[in-house]
Image: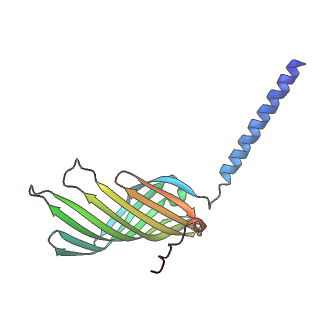
C-alpha cells in the first residue's frame, strides 16, 4: 500500500512539473510584444558604416561646432530583438576645449541628434541629447551621458524606446506609451 501511495505521489508531482514546464514554454512562445523590457545594448560598425561631415565652424578660441554630421551603417545589437537593427542619425555637436600649459587639453561637448533605428518588424524614430567631458589626464574619470527617446512605428506602434549611454555602459528599455508621462507644465508664478 505504501509503495502504491509513493508511486502515485511521484506520478502526480512529475505531472505537475511537466504541466508547469509546458505552461512556461507556452508563455515564452506567446511573449507580449507590448511588454516593458530592460536590456543591455551594443553598437557595432556595419560594412556600410559612413560618417558624412556636416558643416564645421570655429566659434572662437577653444570653441567649435559641427552641425548636421550624418552617421549611418551602425548596427545595434540588444538583448531585446525589438531594439536591434540598423541605426542612422544626424547629430550637431558643440565642443569647448581647455588648453593646458603642457599642450594637452580637456574637452567638453553637448550634442543633439535625430535618430532612426530600423529592423524587419518596424522602426523607432526620435531625438537625443547628451554631454560629455574628456579630461586632459587619462587617469581622470571621463563623463558621458546621452539619452535618446524614440517612438515606435510598425510592430512597435504604441511603444517608446529609451537608449542611454554612459562612459562605460549602454542600455535600453522599452515602455508602453501609456506608462511614459507627459512633461509637466511649471505652475504660473
- Which residue lies at the image location 24% right of the left edge and 73% below the top edge? 65
Quarter in which the N terminus is drawn: top right
How far from the left and from the top, in percent, is residue 41?
A: 45, 54
Q: Is residue 49 left or right of residue 157?
A: left
Q: Nearest the camera: 51 or 125?
A: 125
Quarter in which the C terminus is drawn: bottom left
Give the farthest residue toward the right: 1
How far from the left and from the top, in percent, is residue 174?
A: 54, 60
Q: Is residue 185 left or right of residue 138?
A: right
- 29 in relation to 64, above or below: above
How far from the left and from the top, in percent, is residue 28?
A: 65, 50
- Which residue lies at the image location 9% right of the left edge and 55% below the top edge? 102
How far from the left and from the top, in percent, is residue 116?
A: 45, 69
**How is this picture coloured?**
rainbow
Count of numbered circles in the view = 0
- 179 in relation to 166, above or below: below
In the rendered image, which quarter is residue 99 located in? bottom left
Give the farthest residue toward the front: 189
- Which residue lies at the image location 38% right of the left edge and 62% below the top edge? 146
- Which residue lies at the image location 43% right of the left edge and 65% below the top edge? 148
Q: Nearest the camera: 52 or 145?
A: 145
- 172 in relation to 154, above or below: above
Give the farthest residue toward the left: 101
In the rendered image, which quarter is residue 153 located in? bottom right
Give the farthest residue toward the top: 2
Q: Is residue 74 left or right of residue 155?
A: left
- 5 in relation to 167, above or below: above
Amino acid at each position: 500500500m505504501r509503495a502504491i501511495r509513493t508511486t502515485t505521489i511521484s506520478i502526480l508531482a512529475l505531472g505537475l512539473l511537466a504541466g508547469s514546464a509546458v505552461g512556461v514554454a507556452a508563455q515564452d512562445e506567446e511573449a507580449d510584444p507590448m511588454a516593458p523590457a530592460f536590456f543591455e545594448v551594443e553598437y557595432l560598425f556595419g560594412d556600410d558604416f559612413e560618417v558624412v561631415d556636416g558643416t564645421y565652424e570655429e566659434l572662437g578660441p577653444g570653441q567649435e561646432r559641427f552641425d548636421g554630421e550624418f552617421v549611418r551603417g551602425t548596427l545595434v545589437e540588444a538583448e531585446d530583438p525589438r531594439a536591434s537593427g540598423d541605426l542612422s542619425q544626424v547629430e550637431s555637436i558643440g565642443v569647448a576645449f581647455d588648453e593646458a600649459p603642457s599642450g594637452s587639453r580637456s574637452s567638453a561637448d553637448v550634442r543633439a541628434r535625430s535618430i532612426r533605428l530600423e529592423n524587419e518588424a518596424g522602426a523607432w524614430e526620435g531625438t537625443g541629447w547628451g554631454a560629455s567631458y574628456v579630461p586632459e589626464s587619462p587617469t581622470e574619470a571621463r563623463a558621458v551621458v546621452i539619452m535618446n527617446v524614440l517612438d515606435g512605428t510598425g510592430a512597435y506602434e504604441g511603444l517608446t524606446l529609451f537608449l542611454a549611454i554612459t562612459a562605460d555602459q549602454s542600455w535600453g528599455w522599452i515602455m508602453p506609451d501609456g506608462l511614459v508621462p507627459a512633461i509637466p507644465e511649471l505652475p504660473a508664478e
